[in-house]
Image (tube, rainbow, N blue to C red):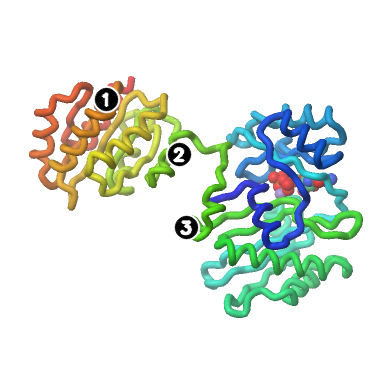
Amino acid sequence: MDLLEYQGKQLFAKHGVPVSPGRPVTTVQEAVSAADELGYPVVVKAQVLIGGRGKAGGIKLAGDREAVEQHAGAILGMEIRGLRVRELWIEEASDIEDEYYAAFVFDRSAKKPMAMFSRMGGMDVEAITAEDPEAMRMLHVDPLLGFQDFHGRRLAFEAGIPEDVIRPVGEMLGKLYEVFVSEDATLVEVNPVVVKTDRSVNALDAKVTIDGNALYRHPQTAEMRNISDESPQERLAKERGLTYVPLDGNIGILGNGAGLVMSTLDVVAQAGGKPANFLDAAGGSKAEAITSAVEVILSNERVSALLLNIFGGITRCDEVAQGLIAAFRQVEPTVPFVVRLDGTNGPEGRALLAEAELPNLHIEETMLGAAEKVVELAG
Ligand code: GDP
Ligand code: MN
């Protein structure tokens, strides 16, 4: 789970990593009152899960109320590489003297966390590192020993930063490691770490990824939502514990098993159609599970036809058919459904469906046949 900058900074603050005060807002009016509270100048920052916001015009310095109004108005609703900005972070502006780069990542081949630090931050780090590999200093962390302040100072010293900031940078690295471990992060990246004109050191940006499998240990983090790029379907699916990926077509897809759903997407595309989503209903043959998944798909108004692709293995097709019939009576869909039901007890399942005479339901035996039918019905 990726966190927005300000959510990452909330975790930083919790562990004593120095950050600037700020407020998350969703309207121009809130932006202005936040800036009034913080005092001018402030920085208006787009909150989207993508880097390079600065270059895209999503980060602006504002010296007074009018400037905040103007920038917040321009940035809210703006699209940054496909992501719509719906939230801003208004932060007390910093007087910057220097920009560094710091990160903790997992080095899977070494089976250890790795600390990274460079005195060339703020810009395109990959490009700089490709040109001058020595600029990026790295250190594997022994998980038992942990990352001590002296490790941090060593990295900072090797990176060649001025002597007076080696100690505070080393300290910050130690605290970032604490965030990495105690928040179950798989990535903690700060670009830039800044040295301000008063020589204090501050995390000016935050990119934090939390291990999704560890979220049960962090209920507060699990609650952090990103209203920018989560569709209502994604939110609903998450609430219901379904694996759902939005796509931009009009054919709703539901299958059992991730592999089967993937192939269904391919076959629909091959038949000339555009899938609206990926949804794996896993082993759910019960009416409840099917109803729940169908509701998520149909809450997307773009869906004009739906393909249910079920292959009965351990799950029996007659059970699935019964679940489907009950689900249909409850949801009463208005868009056409194509059902491909095959595998264990396939004929029995199809016979049950045929007998039920559900309106708008078409039964197919093969995957390609079902894909062609749904493409035709979707129009
Ligand atoms: P990114 O472009 O998405 O990585 O967003 P950042 O938060 O890293 O900001 C991009 C750049 O904006 C930074 O590298 C800074 O140069 C600049 N910036 C951000 N906040 C401030 C600030 O408080 N004061 C000044 N002077 N510049 C800032
Ligand atoms: Mn940045």
Q: In the image, is the residue at mark 1 within 8 Å of ligand 1 by its beta carbon? A: no
Amino acid carrying mark 1 in the image:
Glu
Residue 268: image quadrant is: top left
Which badge, 3 or 2, comes first in the chain's sequence? 3
Q: x and y percent of residue 184 in the render? A: 55, 62
Camera-side mark, 3 or 2: 3
Query: Is tag 3's residue or tag 1's residue first in the polypeptide sequence?
Result: 3
Residue placed under numbered mark 3 in the picture: 216
Q: Is mark 2 within 8 Å of ligand 1?
A: no
Q: Nearer the viewer, residue 41 or 259?
A: 41
Q: Which secondary structure, mark 3?
A: helix
Q: Which residue is mark 2?
A: 234
Disc 1 designates what residue? 332
Instruction: Give, as a three-letter code, the residue at label 2.
Output: Glu
Residue 117 relative to residue 326: left or right: right
Q: Position of residue 219 (x, y in %)?
A: 52, 54
- Disc 2, SS: helix
On the image, the x and y values in percent for residue 110 come to 54, 72
**Vertical side of 222 occupied by 64: above or below:** above
The crowd level at tag 3 (other Cα within 10 Å; few <14, some 14-19, many 20+) is: few
Q: Are marks 1 and 2 in contact (CB under 8 Å)?
A: no
Label 3, label 2: how many angstroms apart (C-alpha)? Answer: 19 Å
Q: Answer above or below: position of 238 versus 373.
A: below
Is 248 on the left-hand or right-hand side of 309?
A: right
Instruction: Give the answer, above or below, for where 211 lies relative to 369.
Output: below
